[in-house]
Image: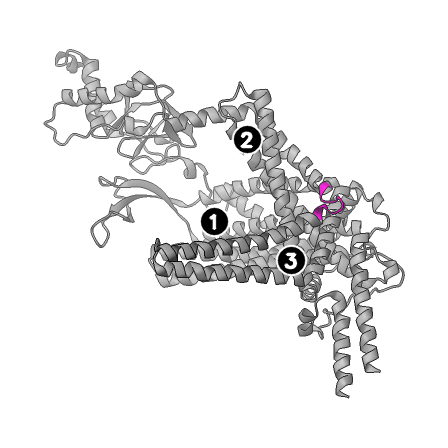
């Protein structure tokens, strides 16, 4: 009887082993969602072609309502809709500079002593003191005989030299005026007119400021003539040489090169990268190439660990023999070598244990490559996702800019203080300014103070952006999974072309946008909570609450892990929805238990896919950069100052394209695995959709199971 029960237990374990992972299934065998898939009807009907219904429609409606509410908040912030709770904003308050009185240039109504209104002076011109004054426009040329001064100083000089009686006292009025300007410049209240670049609301001088910061005078008894001589000598250097900093020259010439060959950068970075992606898919379909590539990388990792262990041990023995290093360091290195040997051994054992699942993973990668190659338009789809997100971000950014500028502007002085040891001025506190005038050594800056309603509105807009961006990602994953599953569950894959991809787009658009909205909502909630914790952590840092900072850091780390897990579960759920048309909750449950039932298979596929995707990323990036470099050298070699800058930009753009390509390829690989499991559980051998390479994997598993079944029956008898 004991022998019978033992044999029966072995038989049941072997039966579960048909799916490959006995240990992973024992914990949840009794759960109704953790059972083999069954067909609702006979025949060889594809699960993808079954009757579909709209899933999770409520969450799609909630997403649309959130967009409507976002528009309402944005309209209130822009002033289109009058609101008592949200003030009208002005984005100029965010970008325009502030003068030394705390007035926003081009925004605040403030009449200077000379009678000018700062609302008509939109640019902030810097003073040597670090403050700024509002001017009508930035200087277009450098002139060290003309100055821009603080309002009071300028008014004083204008009144002094506007008097008719001054001519009786001063022989050369222009020279006297210049000397007075130089005097105030030495006190950092005036600045020579320097050619400046208007950037947002600021004037950025095109010459280094350290060339024009003038020597301060300590007493009023110092002669103006002496100061004038020093200043003239100091500023004559940039005038005579017209020199600019090397970094500025490099930036200007590099930007000129980029503008000249911008079509080449995007042609090789985008176009050639996409072509190389398709070529990579074709290459890995060559017989034996992918297997050789993956197994070579796997054993290269093991050899690398073993070589590192040997080298580490050899170095430790040399240190111990020659006493070049302390004995403790040599001993630590010696023990580290055995740790590396152990890791190499563990890696080898894991690879040997998962060898059949690695073969399955290689087959999944190969079939995913075939699926994408048959629908090449699928590789361009992420571009439309980026364009969609960009269009939404433009509208969202306008609303957020108006909302962010609706706060009350407060001028503050930032003043350094000595630390507790009185050694370094590292402690900086923000002190409220006194009528907009800061003490010496302090910096004036603007700060916007928001009401609670404005803060809540900003948090809501951030949440909507998280939700929408994740929704766009989820829709892309659903479409790729649907297109791949349509390819897999097709009896004649030669007929699968780009039209199949557009069929998948229609399938998702008319049935499963709600599922994408549901899954993205969960991720958006987690991201919003993380954003709140980041805000609270910054407030705690200002209050120097170290315990609270540590606790918040731990919570943020935990939420980051939760977010990663949820994204992975969502990905599996979207694949289940693409194959079977499940709603999000059921798809999540089915996907979760599928992971448990096939943990080792999924682990092997994950490792193999990461290897292949990494190689593909390197291939696309490097090949695009090299091709672009030689093209630039042949056709533009004599016209460009730097070849490496455009080449680097080509590599960056190609890397971004490779990332999008890998996102599609990785989703296709995961979908092929789930289609394989569904095919294995739903259909008999003669009705399966599995391609030849995957069918061979199923056949070998079935033969092994039947052989063990016969052995178990004979032992029972």
Mark 3, secondary structure of its residue: helix
The stretch of residues the image draws in magenta is: 283-290
Quadrant location of the N terminus?
bottom right
Q: Determine which of the numbered discs, if any, sits on residue 84 in the image.
A: 1
- Tell me the distance, in whole angstroms, between the alpha carbons under discs 1 and 3: 41 Å
Q: Are marks 3 and 2 in contact (CB under 8 Å)?
A: no
Residue at 67% from the left image edge and 59% from the top image edge? 602
| Towards the viewer: 669 or 342 | 342
Q: Nearer the viewer, mark 1 or mark 2?
A: 2
Residue beneath disc 3: 570
- Furthest toward the right, the residue is 43
Residue at 25% from the left image edge and 25% from the top image edge? 154
Q: Image check: 90 left or right of 620?
A: left
Mark 2, secondary structure of its residue: helix
- Furthest toward the left, the residue is 221
**First in residue order: circle 3 vs circle 2:** 3
Q: Determine which of the numbered discs, if any, sits on residue 647 in the image.
A: 2
């Amino acid at each position: 009887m004991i022998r019978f029960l033992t044999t029966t237990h072995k038989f049941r374990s072997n039966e579960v082993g048909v799916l490959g992972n006995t240990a992973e299934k024992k914990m949840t065998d009794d759960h109704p969602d953790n059972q083999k898939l069954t067909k609702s009807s006979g025949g060889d009907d594809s699960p993808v072609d079954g009757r579909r219904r709209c899933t999770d429609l409520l969450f799609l409606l909630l997403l649309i309502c959130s967009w409507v509410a976002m528009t309402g908040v944005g309209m209130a912030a822009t002033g289109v809709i009058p609101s008592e709770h949200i003030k009208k904003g002005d984005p100029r308050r965010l970008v325009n500079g502030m003068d030394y009185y705390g007035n926003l240039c081009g925004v605040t109504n403030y009449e200077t002593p000379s009678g000018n209104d700062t609302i008509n002076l939109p640019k902030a011109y810097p003073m040597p003191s670090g403050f700024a004054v509002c001017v009508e426009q930035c200087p277009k040329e450098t002139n060290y005989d003309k100055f821009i001064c603080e309002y009071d100083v300028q008014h004083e000089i204008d009144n002094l030299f506007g008097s008719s009686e001054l001519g009786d006292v001063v022989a050369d009025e222009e020279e006297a005026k210049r000397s007075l300007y130089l005097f105030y410049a030495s006190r950092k209240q005036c600045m020579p007119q320097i050619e400046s670049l208007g950037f947002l609301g600021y004037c950025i001088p095109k010459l280094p400021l350290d060339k024009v910061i003038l020597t301060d005078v300590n007493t009023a008894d110092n002669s103006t003539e002496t100061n004038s001589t020093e200043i003239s000598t100091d500023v004559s250097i940039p005038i005579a040489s017209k020199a600019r900093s090397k970094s500025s020259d490099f930036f200007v010439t590099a930007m000129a090169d980029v503008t000249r060959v911008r079509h080449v950068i995007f042609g090789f970075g985008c176009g050639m990268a996409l072509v190389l992606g398709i070529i990579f898919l074709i290459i890995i379909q060559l017989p034996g190439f992918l297997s050789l590539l993956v197994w070579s990388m796997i054993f290269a990792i093991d050899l690398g660990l073993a070589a590192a262990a040997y080298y580490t041990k050899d170095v430790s023995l040399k240190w111990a023999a020659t006493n070049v290093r302390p004995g403790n360091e040599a001993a630590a290195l010696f023990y580290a070598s055995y740790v590396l040997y152990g890791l190499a051994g563990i890696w080898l054992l894991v690879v040997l244990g998962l060898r059949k699942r690695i073969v399955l993973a290689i087959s999944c990668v190969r079939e995913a490559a075939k699926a994408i190659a048959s629908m090449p338009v699928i590789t361009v789809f992420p571009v439309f996702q980026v364009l969609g997100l960009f269009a939404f971000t433009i509208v969202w950014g306008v609303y957020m800019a108006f909302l962010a500028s609706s706060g009350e502007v407060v001028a503050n002085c930032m003043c350094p203080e000595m630390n507790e040891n009185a050694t370094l001025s590292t402690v900086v506190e923000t002190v409220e300014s006194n009528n907009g005038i800061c003490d010496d050594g302090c910096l004036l800056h603007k700060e916007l103070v928001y009401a609670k309603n404005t803060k809540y509105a900003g948090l809501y807009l951030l949440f909507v952006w998280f939700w929408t961006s994740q929704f766009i990602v989820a829709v892309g994953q659903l479409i790729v999974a649907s297109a791949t599953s349509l390819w897999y569950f097709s009896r004649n894959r030669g007929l699968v072309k780009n039209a199949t991809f557009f069929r998948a787009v229609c399938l998702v658009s008319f049935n499963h946008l709600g599922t994408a909205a549901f899954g993205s909502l969960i991720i958006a909630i987690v991201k919003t909570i993380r954003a709140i914790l980041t805000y609270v952590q910054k407030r705690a840092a200002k209050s120097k609450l170290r315990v609270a900072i540590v606790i918040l850091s731990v919570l943020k780390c935990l939420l980051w892990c939760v977010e990663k897990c949820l994204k992975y579960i969502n990905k599996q759920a979207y694949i289940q929805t693409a194959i079977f048309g499940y709603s999000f909750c059921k798809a999540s449950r089915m996907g979760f238990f599928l992971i448990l039932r096939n943990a080792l298979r999924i682990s092997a596929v994950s490792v193999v896919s990461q290897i292949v995707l990494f190689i593909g990323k390197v291939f696309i990036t490097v090949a695009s950069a090299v091709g672009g470099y030689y093209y630039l050298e042949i056709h533009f070699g004599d016209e460009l100052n730097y070849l490496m800058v455009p080449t680097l930009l080509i590599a960056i753009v190609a890397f971004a394209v490779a990332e999008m390509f890998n996102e599609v390829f990785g989703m296709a690989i995961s979908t092929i695995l789930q289609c394989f499991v569904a095919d294995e559980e739903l259909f008999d051998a003669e009705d399966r959709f599995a391609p030849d390479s995957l069918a061979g994997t199923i056949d070998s598993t079935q033969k092994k199971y039947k052989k063990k079944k016969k052995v178990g029956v004979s032992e029972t008898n």
